[in-house]
Image (cartoon, coloured by chain):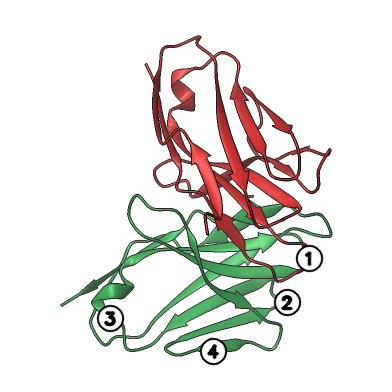
Chain colours: A red, B green
Amino acid sequence: NAGVTQTPKFQVLKTGQSMTLQCAQDMNHNSMYWYRQDPGMGLRLIYYSASEGTTDKGEVPNGYNVSRLNKREFSLRLESAAPSQTSVYFCASRGEYRLNEAFFGQGTRLTVV
Amino acid sequence: RKEVEQDPGPFNVPEGATVAFNCTYSNSASQSFFWYRQDCRKEPKLLMSVYSSGNEDGRFTAQLNRASQYISLLIRDSKLSDSATYLCAVNMGSARQLTFGSGTQLTVLP
């Protein structure tokens, strides 16, 4: 009963390096989300995907790209990491009905030095 | 103005107290509303969905006021284990975009 699985759990990058955060869900959900969480800022939406093959920008998309590889997987890529991207990243998925809750992965703690 | 705004915290209350949080949203077409609980260094987990007529789950009561565009969460008889950050979430309009507030930190004191 895995739910939403994120990898890696921790990562340290140097400024300018690139990396991809992976997310997979096994609940057959159509919608998937990437959020970042900074102290005192709550969860800010980076990108979301309402269904396989579609992606949309959220509140803070600059510096990120996403790929909805299939229904299960939604990856987040940092092409050239910056210290401002130091944060905790959460992936989430959600079913298609209005009151369906979002299920979250355990988060990725990313530090850019 | 942020799309979803919450009461600034932190709230420090004694055990047994009643505490209420509010959350306002800007998009009048918003359709779904939720309260999540987040423990320190953990992922958010659903506390309760908010129904149009309001709903209760044990010591927790959620209300929706569409006219004033806010939702509320009432916690009665606070327990030490209620200490956490409470996040409201709003499904903005007809899209699947799920937007969260910045969270309110609650500490229940013995």
For the residues labelled 3 and 1, say whether their Cβ atoms are less than 8 Å apart. no
Residue indicated by mark 2: B66
* Left or right for B23, reference B103: right
- Mark 1–mark 4 contact, CB under 8 Å? no
Q: Residue A3 occupies which quadrant of the picture?
A: bottom right
Residue nearest the observer in this picture, B90 or B3: B90
Residues under numbered marks 4 and 2 in contact, where contact means CB atoms less than 8 Å apart? no
Residue under label 4: B56
Q: Position of residue A67 (x, y in %)?
A: 72, 31
Secondary structure found at label 1: loop
User: Which badge, 2 or 1, comes first in the chain's sequence?
Assistant: 1
Q: Nearer the viewer, mark 4 or mark 2?
A: 4
Please state the chain letter of the residue tagged with numbered disc 4 in the rendered image. B
Q: Secondary structure at mark 2?
A: loop
Q: Residue at x 33, y 62 (%)?
A: B10
- Report the residue that reaches farthest toward the left: B110
Verify CB contact (< 8 Å) between mark 2 and mark 1.
yes
Identity, as a three-letter code, of the amino acid under mark 3: Lys
Q: Amino acid at mark 1?
A: Ser
Furthest residue in direction top, as rendered = A16
Q: Which residue is mark 3?
A: B79
Nearest-to-viewer mark from 2 and 3: 3
Q: Amino acid at mark 2?
A: Arg
**Disc nearer the start of the sequence (3/1):** 1
Which residue appears at 63% of the width and 72% of the height? B70
**Location of mark 1 (residue):** B28
Q: Residue at x 73, y 77 (%)?
A: B66
Residue B71, percent from left and from top: 60, 74
The subunit letter for the residue under badge 3 reads B
Residue B13 visible to the viewer? no
Residue at point 24%, 76% (across, down): B80
- The mark nearer the N terminus, 2 or 3, is 2
